């Protein structure tokens, strides 16, 4: 008696094809830009890589290997045939759990334009799934379905025919977003673009904190700009980011200081003042707690092996 193949079985050949494609364009450990705007390939050849970074709005597809992502007080397990959607900018810590030179960790990141998400939500209207959650987490994952995997294969295959990129790339990206919207995580994605939702209001608050991260945080002012009470804003913000507004701002400041030291060669004390710290010693203590080493030591490590250390947070 014949049995119908499971969804996972149907996805396996496409996943195998993606492994070969990504390995071809990511021949060694690191994070690789591609000819497709906003699309990166990530590769790690060993487990244990742990790095902190800021996830931007994107769809991430894990092609091979395993990884955990820590967002505040939440841990997300990320395995093959799983995809993850980030709706807002989120400071995270990622750790590659399973990888080897013969079977490396491989992932695809596709940046998402939230305006395009909003446009599709408007066009789909009541056809989209709904969910009772008033304010979902800004990062969520689900098993990949055949439609998303098939569309992602077609997107990556465009690298073999670059002459088709200008026309087909935006169409296929839009289809990937559409398939995510009508899939298991559609309700969460919709919550962040609907103007009257708590998720959308928190996304506006996050944008303001990002723009003014070096300034003192005034929660009352933020709450007023999105027409929320301070307590409602606090609880909704924590639902989305799994941390308080103050904790979120601190992480952004530390990430920005790290970039200033690494890319512009600033001393730790100068970088600390630029991102809003009043005490370099306080900055150094918080930096060490977050990144595992004092600023000077951490930046030296990054300069010796920048690409390897970037893998786990991408």
Image (spheres, rainbow, N blue to C red):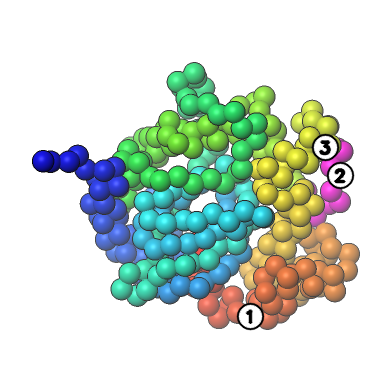
Q: Which mark is residue 218?
A: 2
| Magenta residues (range) | 212-221
Res. 192 image quadrant: top right
Residue 194 in picture, x, y percent from top left: 61, 27
Q: Which mark is residue 231?
A: 3
- The residue drawn where x is 80% and y is 62% is 274
**Which of the marked residues, 1 or 2, is nearer the chain's N terminus?**
2
Secondary structure category for the residue under label 2: loop
Q: Is residue 292 magenta?
A: no
Residue 13 visible? The answer is yes
- The residue drawn where x is 73% and y is 70% is 289
Image marks 2 and 3: residues in contact by CB distance under 8 Å: no
Residue 270 visible? The answer is no
- Give the number of callouts: 3
Disc 3 crowd, CA 10 A, few/some/many (<14, 14-19, 20+): few
State whether the magenta stretch is mostly helix, strand or loop.
loop
Res. 18 image quadrant: bottom left
Res. 235 image quadrant: top right
């Amino acid at each position: 008696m014949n049995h119908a193949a499971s969804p996972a079985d149907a996805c396996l050949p496409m996943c195998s094809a993606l492994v070969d494609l990504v390995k071809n364009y990511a021949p060694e450990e690191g994070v690789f830009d591609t000819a497709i705007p906003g699309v990166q390939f990530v590769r790690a050849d060993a487990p244990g890589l742990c790095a902190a970074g800021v996830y931007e709005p994107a769809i991430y597809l894990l092609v091979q290997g395993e990884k955990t992502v820590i967002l505040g007080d939440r841990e997300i397990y990320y395995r093959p045939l799983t995809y993850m959607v980030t709706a807002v900018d989120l400071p995270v810590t990622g750790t590659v759990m399973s990888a080897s030179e013969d079977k490396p960790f491989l992932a695809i990141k596709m940046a998402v334009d939230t305006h395009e998400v909003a446009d599709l939500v408007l066009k789909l209207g009541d056809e989209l799934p709904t969910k009772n959650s008033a304010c979902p987490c800004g990062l969520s994952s689900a098993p990949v379905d055949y439609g998303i995997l098939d569309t992602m294969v077609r997107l990556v295959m465009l690298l073999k025919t670059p002459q088709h990129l200008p026309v087909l790339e935006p169409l296929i990206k839009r289809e990937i977003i559409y398939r995510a919207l009508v899939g298991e995580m559609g309700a969460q994605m919709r919550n962040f673009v609907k103007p009257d939702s708590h998720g959308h209001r928190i996304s506006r608050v996050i944008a303001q904190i990002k723009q003014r991260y070096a300034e003192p945080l005034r929660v009352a002012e933020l709450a007023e700009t999105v027409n929320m009470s301070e307590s409602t804003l606090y609880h909704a913000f924590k639902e989305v980011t799994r941390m308080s507004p103050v904790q979120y701002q601190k992480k952004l400041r530390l990430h920005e200081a790290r970039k200033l030291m690494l890319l512009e060669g600033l001393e730790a004390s100068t970088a600390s003042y630029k991102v809003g710290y009043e005490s370099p010693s306080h900055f150094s203590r918080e930096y060490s707690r977050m990144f595992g080493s004092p600023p000077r030591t951490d930046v030296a490590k990054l300069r010796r092996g920048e690409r390897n250390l970037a893998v786990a947070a991408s």
